[in-house]
């Protein structure tokens, strides 16, 4: 029974890595849904002066990174 529960937790973790962008902003961690299933840009560091490069990234632009940065005041 422990094995099945462990496999379900692992499957949920893998699914979330393929489904969401985890974006570290100056104040906190934000999560955006991905536009398609991939491991590209799963963990994104948006602290400091890297924001323009993130806005120009097509995957993050489709996910709504610009709205997220406006909302957070960056």
Image (spheres, helix red, strand yellow):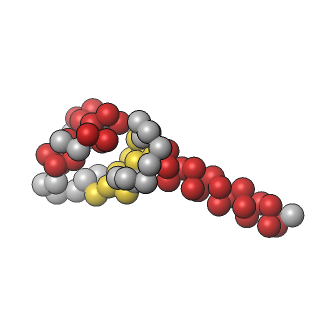
Q: Residue pushed farthest bottom?
A: 3
Asked if residue 26 shows in the view, the reply is no
Looking at the image, residue 29 sits to the left or right of residue 73; the answer is: right
Count the marks: how many? Answer: 0
- Residue under the point 25% across and 53% down: 46
Residue 68: give x, y in percent of width and height. 30, 37
State which quadrant residue 33 falls in. Answer: top left
- Quadrant that contains the N terminus: bottom right
Looking at the image, residue 36 sits to the left or right of residue 55; the answer is: right
Asked whether 73 or 40 is in front, the reply is 40
Residue 14: give x, y in percent of width and height. 57, 56
- Quadrant that contains the C terminus: top left
- Residue under the point 32% across and 55% down: 44
State which quadrant residue 58 falls in. Answer: top left
- Residue under the point 35% across and 36% down: 63
Q: Is residue 13 above or below residue 30?
A: below
Q: Residue pushed farthest right?
A: 1
Residue 30: give x, y in percent of width and height. 39, 47
Asked if residue 3 shows in the view, the reply is yes
Asked whether 48 or 41 is in front, the reply is 41
Residue 49: give x, y in percent of width and height. 13, 54
């Amino acid at each position: 029974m422990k094995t099945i529960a462990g496999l379900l937790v692992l499957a949920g973790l893998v699914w979330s890595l393929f489904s969401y962008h985890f974006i570290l902003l100056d104040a906190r961690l934000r999560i955006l849904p991905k536009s398609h299933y991939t491991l590209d840009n799963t963990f994104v560091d948006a602290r400091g002066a890297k924001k323009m490069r993130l806005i120009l990234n097509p995957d993050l632009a489709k996910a709504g990174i610009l709205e997220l940065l406006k909302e957070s005041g960056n």
